[in-house]
Each structure stands twice: as C-alpha cells, then as structure tokens.
Amino acid sequence: MNVIEIKNLTKSYGSARGITDVTLNVEQGEVFGFIGPNGAGKSTTIRTLLGLIHPTNGTATIFGKSCIEDPSVRKDLGYLPSEVFYYDNMRVIDLLKYSASFYGKDCTARIKELAETMDLDLKKKIEDLSFGNKKKVGIVQGLLHEPKLIILDEPTSGLDPLMQQKFFELIEQENKKGATIFFSSHILSEVQRLCSRVAFIKDGRIIRLEKISSLQENSYKRIHLEAKSGLSDSLFKVPGISDLKLEEGKADFIFKGNINDIVKKAAEINLRNISISEPDLEEIFMHYYAKED
Ligand SMILES: Nc1ncnc2c1ncn2[C@@H]1O[C@H](COP(=O)(O)OP(=O)(O)OP(=O)(O)O)[C@@H](O)[C@H]1O
C-alpha cells in the first residue's frame, strides 16, 4: 500500500518555478529519501503534499486522502519543517504539551523519553535555546504523538554530529515500529545511510528515482593526489576518470569504477598525499545526471 501518492504535482509561484510534474509514491514502512540542492523544490513538494500551499496542478494524497479535503489525516502525521519558529517566551515543556493537546492523547511520558534521547532541556525558555536545540524541539514535536508517517524536511541542519547520530537511531527505531518515513535532504550520505529508495529533484523536476542499493553500485569518488614531482596527464588515462584538474604536481578528479584501478595507478606515483572522499551532491548532479539535462 502507498502511504504517499504524488501525481503530476505542479506549483508555480506566479511566473516563478516551484515544482513541475512531480510524481512519486512512498510505500508503507519505507524510509524514502528526497534529495536535491538548495532551491530544487523539496520544501514546495512537502508543503503542497501537506496542504499548506495549494498546487497549480496535480494531486497529492496521504493514506489515500488529500490533506486539503480531509485534514484528519494530519493526526497520523509527524512533520518537521526545515525552519522552525516558536513563541520565544514559552518554556519547551509548555510548547510541547500544547502541541500534544491537538492529538487528544497524553504524550507526557513520550515527551520525556524523546527529550532524554535528544538531550533537550524541557524547562528552558525557547528564546534561550541555540538553533540546534530549537531543531530538537521540532523533532520532539514531530514525533511525540507516535505518527504513522513522519515527514522530515532537512532535519539534521544545525545538529552536531553526536545529535545527528542519535536522531538517525531514533528514526530507525520509529521505522522498526512501523512508521513510514519521508526524508528530505541535500546530503547524499545521510540519505544513503537511512533510506531504501531515493528520488532526486533538480530545478523542480524529479530526474531520477532509484533504490539506494543500485546507487551504491554506481558510486562515485572524488580523488585528490599530490605528488613530490610533476604529474603527466598520461597517468590519468584510466576509464572512469572525469573532471580531471591537473596543476603543479596536484591532480583532482572524479572516479567511477573499481577503486583498485586507482590505487594501482597511485602506486606508480611518488606521492606526498592522497585523499578519497564522497563527491558532494552538486558534483553527482553534474556528472552522474548530466545526461538528464
Ligand atoms: N513563496 C515563494 N514565492 C516565490 N518563489 C518561491 C516561494 N517558495 C519557493 N519558491 C521558489 O521555488 C523553488 C523551490 O524552492 P524550495 O524552497 O521548494 O526548494 P528546496 O529544495 O526546499 O530548497 P532548500 O534546500 O534551499 O530549502 C525555488 O526556486 C524558490 O525560489
């Protein structure tokens, strides 16, 4: 069964592009990644799905119902917006209790449990919290009623690495308990870590929808080499190398293929340094998805 169904969803802001013809389904129990660079249309898709803004065209349903026509579906939904705004002079606990009151259930124990996991001080005033701690309030607020569907829009921005780790564990636990997760991000590695499928959005359009397993088979690396002497470009005539930049004993390129081929090549060079890293999303868009342009 599909928990989310988005069909030909289009949203224009006057003459400005928002999203165009977005179609995707999220199955029950899935952790689905939604990835794209800044301004690609992630938040617009989510806000239209939630009925917070009206589509120019197309349809979007949650549990088979439209949020606009049937706002009751929101009871089973936890949403963490990309930016959170609160009444500054409220205490965290009062804000969370107020949020819980909309669901008509006692969420006190759950709030305490989540606050403990995320290391959030419930007694503090919102205005005294850092950006990252405000984000934690949003996370607790999104999860306190144990929703069946959790929609997260850039949830880790502002969280330190330890908190990101705890947050991922929390999301994994919720998924094991049966929640479906829709996870928007511009960080490929966190989507790769958590999700089973991912949709790539670029310039308002879905350009790829893939299983994470097939994405990993096609994985790209960015490689940087520094040699003690000059480097000739004949050394880099290896299939799978692209975006080669060579200057004064330094080489920088993207490689797709068997990493051993590059390690063997590097062994021929008198190296000062080598680094192998994940290319960032922009690079993947430029190289892996260039043919989609
Ligand atoms: N209220 C608005 N009025 C006009 N244009 C808008 C509005 N909201 C979004 N847009 C435009 O719609 C496009 C998609 O924006 P959106 O915020 O959905 O992207 P995003 O993928 O969520 O980006 P980010 O990662 O930066 O949050 C952008 O070109 C943006 O400028």
Image (cartoon, grey):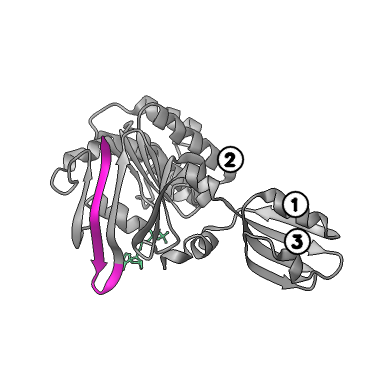
Residue 234 image position (x, y, % from top left): 75, 69
N-terminal of the two: label 1 or label 3? 3
Reading the image, the residue beneath label 1 is 263
Residue 80, disc = none
Circle 3/circle 2 CB separation < 8 Å: no
- Relative depth, front residue between 191 and 86: 191
Residue 226 position by quadrant: bottom right
From the viewer's perspective, is residue 95 above or below residue 237? Answer: above
Which residues are drawn in magenta? 1-17
Q: Which is closer to the viewer, label 3 or label 2?
A: 3
Secondary structure mostly taken by the magenta-highlighted segment of the chain? strand
Q: Is residue 159 visible?
A: no
N-terminal of the two: label 1 or label 2? 2
Q: CA distance from mark 1 to mark 2?
A: 32 Å
**Amino acid type at image mark 1:** Val
Q: Which is closer to the viewer, label 1 or label 2?
A: 1
Q: Is mark 1 within 8 Å of ligand 1?
A: no
**Amino acid type at image mark 3:** Leu
**Amino acid type at image mark 2:** Leu
N-terminal of the two: label 3 or label 2? 2
From the viewer's perspective, is residue 139 above or below residue 287? Answer: above
Residue 162, disc = 2
